[in-house]
């Protein structure tokens, strides 16, 4: 009788630990793809250091593409730093 109870406890604990491990692995995989796993993959694909890789990293980090940022600031992608600064100050200093 006691052997049966011990076996049930072991099986129950095994399934709980297995479920917890699977959930932790899924969360770790999701975090890796969101926070840098894709950057590591991009780096290994030969894009590391290129303008495209930098833009991809910025988009992942900020959650906003360059096109969206330009649209918010009302500038073109080729705008100079003075224009960008002027538009940013205009947006952030409004009350």
Image (spheres, helix red, strand yellow):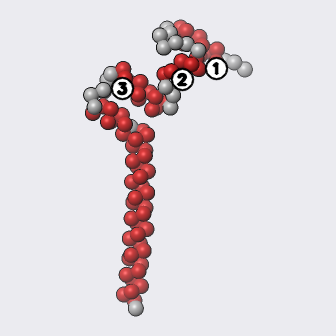
Residue 6 position within the rendered picture, expressed as x and y whole percent measured from the top left: 39, 83
C-alpha span from label 1 to label 2: 17 Å
The circle drawn on residue 68 is 2
- Mark 3–mark 2 Cα distance, whole angstroms, equals 18 Å
Determine contact: label 1, label 2, CB under 8 Å.
no
Give the numbered dot on residue 53. 3
User: Where does the C terminus fall, quadrant-wise?
Assistant: top right
Is the residue under label 2 in contact with that under label 3 (CB below 8 Å)? no
- Residue at coordinates 54% horizontally, 23% vertically from top-left? 68
The answer to whether 15 is drawn above or below residue 37 in the figure is below
- First in sequence, mark 1 or 2: give its number: 2
- Above or below 2: residue 42: above
* Quadrant the N terminus occupies: bottom left
Closer to the eye: label 3 or 2:
2
For label 2, count other residues whose C-alpha is less than 10 Å away and answer few (under 14), some (14-19) or many (20+).
few
Q: Residues within 10 Å of mark 3 (few under 14, many from 20)?
A: some
Q: Is residue 2 left or right of residue 68?
A: left
> Of marks 1 and 3, which one's residue comes earlier in the chain?
3
Which of the two residues, 83 or 56, is positioned nearer the viewer here?
Answer: 56
Quarter-wise, where is residue 42 in the image? top left
Q: Please tell me whether residue 55 is drawn above or below residue 39 in the rendered image.
A: above
Q: Which mark is residue 92?
A: 1
Q: Residue at x 39, y 54 (%)?
A: 25
Q: Which mark is residue 44?
A: none
Task: Tell me the residue at 46%/28% (across/down).
Answer: 59
């Amino acid at each position: 009788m006691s052997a049966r109870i011990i076996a049930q406890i072991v099986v129950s604990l095994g399934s709980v630990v297995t479920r917890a491990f699977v959930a932790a692995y899924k969360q770790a995989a999701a975090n890796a793809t969101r926070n840098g796993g894709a950057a590591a993959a991009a780096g290994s694909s030969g894009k590391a250091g290129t303008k495209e890789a930098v833009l991809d990293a910025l988009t992942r980090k900020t959650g906003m593409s360059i096109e969206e940022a330009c649209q918010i600031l009302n500038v073109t992608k080729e705008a100079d730093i003075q224009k960008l600064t002027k538009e940013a100050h205009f947006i952030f200093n409004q009350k």
